[in-house]
Image: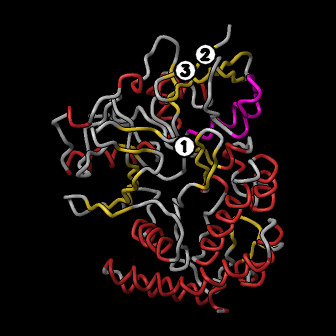
Amino acid sequence: MSKILHAYVDGKLAGSFAESRGQITFEYALGATQPISLSMPISSSRHKNKAASAWLWGLLPDNQEALRSMAVEAGTSATSVFGLLQHHGRDVAGAIQLLPPGEVPSDARKKSVTTVQERLSDTELEQLLRETTDRYSGKPVTTFVTDAFKFSVAGAQPKIALTADENEDFLPPSKEFPTTHIIKPNDPQSSSYIKEMDILEVMCLAAARRVGLDAANAYLWYAPSGTMSAVVTERYDRAINEDGTIDRLHQEDFCQAMSVLPEKKYQHQHGGPGLNAISKFLESTLPAVDAPRVILDLFRAAVFNVGIVGTDAHAKNYSLMIEGSTVSLAPLYDTISAASHVQIYDKVFFPMKINDSYNMMSITPDGLVKAGTKMGIPEQQAHDSVYSILCKLPGAIEDVAAEMGEVDLGQSVLDGLAQFSPVRYI
């Protein structure tokens, strides 16, 4: 007998996933208008295991300890994507709510955040974030808020999703509201700790906006104990209305869009999607009016990631926004420079091939231009994009670092760029 997982958009049934004998299929509901993935176009009502399974796994963390913790809470196996999402699929990336038969989607009866008076204290938030790091490191945990971990956020780093009001004060975790912010703790006591990683992420996202790219808004949060900090990122796939209700906006990452499992996200290490494969996919899949724009935006985002020595810019760290038949590149997120952490004798690799090379020391501005032309971008347009971004980048880092009070860290990043980034040729 098949297991069923219903997919809802805005409280209405969009389709259903079914699992039978280890194979997963997806079938759109009659009258559905919102495609849930480019890998599963609405022109075909039924889709097979490769696309359906990869899309579901793409909603879950890329961290085995986190999956094991989620599985214990759900009473299932960490290898059962269906079992995990039956319990944790109510709030995921994009516009979809995934629910087992008989459960009602909260989006069918949207509530305003103004109806909830209670807010999390910073001490309570710190406790939640410590439990989050424990879940991602395999430590036993005891959740102090019942609904605290009923969401699923992709990625390898510890993180929690919460709902905030218009003042960016956090509500206690609840199944009644879409989450609006993703919070990533950087805890020195955690095995995932990397010094200054949170500061670097906020710095790089702000620098991306300075050079003309669309990037998620983020800020730093400091625990009252003084022993932990975190990156708080506004979810670009959520919109808060004037009445306090929250809309989910649909998105998917490039692994989901191309039916690639998360473990294949790195081109360099795993043979995952690279810029050429992604651009060919977009050209063959998107409407002619969208494809050139999305490909150019992806190229510009990749140029920025190369420029900052963004060694984690794999296919799951770029996403698409999908609204009906209109597709656009999502704002940049999870964008971090490794420049301040690498040494001159290190071999530093970009996760996607740039003009036949992964080695950062081999990537030049002209090589980036050539990579752009291989993606189908006119040479002059590729040239202008590369030189505009790379020329502005050092100044953007310097200015943002000064505004953040992180001049020394900013200089450390600039020193690393002078060694490894193609900005050294500008």
Q: Position of residue 236 (x, y in %)?
A: 46, 51
Q: Is residue 72 above or below residue 129?
A: above
Q: Amino acid at mark 3?
A: Leu
Given contact means CB atoms under 8 Å apart, are the residues at marks 1 and 2 in contact? no
* Tag 1 residue: 61
Question: Dot 2 surroundings within 10 Å: few (below 14), some, or many (20 or more)?
Answer: some
The location of residue 297, given as percent across then percent down, is 64, 64
Amino acid at pointer 1: Pro
Q: Residue at x 46, y 56 (%)?
A: 191
Does the segment drawn in magenta span residue 58? yes
- Most distant residue in the top direction: 1
Foreground pick, 392 / 60? 392
Q: Is residue 55 above or below residue 189?
A: above
SS for tag 2? strand
Q: Quadrant of the N terminus?
A: top right
Give the foreground label among 1 and 2.
Answer: 2
Q: Where is 160 relative to 423, above or below? A: above
Magenta span includes 82: no
Q: Amino acid at mark 2?
A: Ile
Q: Which residues are magenta?
A: 38-59
Which residue does the numbered mark 3 point to in the structure image? 13
Could you tell which of marks 3 and 2 lies nearer the N-terminus?
2
Looking at the image, tell me whether mark 1 or mark 2 is earlier in sequence order.
2
**Mark 1–mark 3 contact, CB under 8 Å?**
no
Q: Which residue is mark 2?
A: 4
Q: Residue at x 54, y 82 (%)?
A: 393
